[in-house]
Image (tube, rainbow, N blue to C red):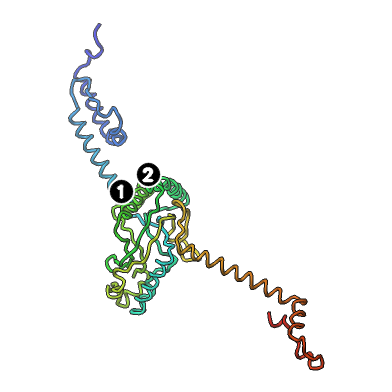
Amino acid sequence: MERPEAGINSNECENVSRKKKMSEEFEANTMDSLVDMPFATVDIQDDCGITDEPQINLKRSQENEWVKSDQVKKRKKKRKDYQPNYFLSIPITNKEIIKGIKILQNAIIQQDERLAKAMVSDGSFHITLLVMQLLNEDEVNIGIDALLELKPFIEELLQGKHLTLPFQGIGTFGNQVGFVKLAEGDHVNSLLEIAETANRTFQEKGILVGESRSFKPHLTFMKLSKSPWLRKNGVKKIDPDLYEKFISHRFGEEILYRIDLCSMLKKKQSNGYYHCESSIVIGKKPIGIRDLINEALHRETMGLKSKVKQIKELLLKPETQARIRRELFEGRLINNSNSANDVDFSTTLT
């Protein structure tokens, strides 16, 4: 029996060729979806025995280039529109560090009072671990989920140990932002690894985050951008002479205990710290010698206040006052005593 293909003549080949041209536009429109499919690499041969593989492969290559170019343009546009409004914060809670920075700020202000408006409030001191863009409530919830997923990774990294962050010296970003430096040491590598893990975790959730390679841990204490008025009045840079005495000053150590997801734009808390959407606690909060001393002093003070209150209540009792009168005036002649000599202890003690 003769195969059906054997009956194909030159006219049919022309029809096939014409149909092929008519389908080129359709093929171009659908190529985006075809290039990623398994059958896109299968050789195509028409009934006339003419192989179109080189032309189609060329077209596929052109379409792939267009797709890649379009994706790059979209990524660039997305990155251009990227404006971070949330960040991961490690709050600074060590009172020694806060006190040292306040002394530094006051020393600078004494030399140039205009810079008072450039100072960061003590309630806002923190280390920024990661910045991101969360555009709505759903994305904020996704960010919270990512933060919660970050906790076991950090605890596994630290293996039950505390991450101590020592601060020493002063640095600037382009003489526009003043910050306290994180001292060199193994803790820097651990913090960088935590930042990279956070970056990866949030990106996997589809959140647009800042570049991890630009992460430089620091503790900001002043920035000129807080007051545009300064530039108008000739203050364009932070003069290094202003903080010369603190260039190698050791401010203290902060132990990583908490990481917060904070908003840059929402109203700050009453203590000056940023609006916090969620937090994770890393291990247990350590208790230092200073904390133990403060706790002991607090207990002693409360004990003394309680004893003073008991003594006051005892002295105000009528029977106690009567007994005191008898002991004070015993042996005196009754005719020498008068009402003016009576002591009203109730008014004396209150």
- Residue located beneath label 1 in the image: 75
Q: Which quadrant does the N terminus fall into?
A: top left
- Residue located beneath label 2 in the image: 204
Residue that protrudes farthest toward the front in the picture: 331
What amino acid is at disc 1? Answer: Arg
Q: Which structural element holds mark 1?
A: helix
* Relative image position of residue 330 (x, y in whole percent): 77, 86
Question: At 64% from the left edge and 73% from the top edge, which residue is drawn?
Answer: 308
What amino acid is at disc 2? Answer: Glu
Q: Which quadrant does the C terminus fall into?
A: bottom right
Q: As rendered, which of 100 and 41 lies closer to the eye?
A: 100
Question: At 22% from the left edge and 22% from the top edge, which residue is drawn?
Answer: 46
Question: At 28% from the left edge and 45% from the top edge, which residue is drawn?
Answer: 70
**Left or right of 286 in this view: 1:** left
Spatial CA span between label 1 and label 2 = 16 Å
One can see residue 26 in this view = no
Local packing at callout 1 (Cα closer than 10 Å; few below 14, some 14-19, many 20+) is few
Q: As rendered, which of 106 and 144 lies closer to the eye?
A: 106
Give residue 188's quadrant in the image: bottom left
Q: Which structural element holds mark 2?
A: helix
The answer to the question of whether label 1 and label 2 lie on touching residues, with beta carbons closer than 8 A, is: no
Local packing at callout 2 (Cα closer than 10 Å; few below 14, some 14-19, many 20+) is few
First in sequence, mark 1 or 2: give its number.
1
**Left or right of 237 in this view: 153:** right
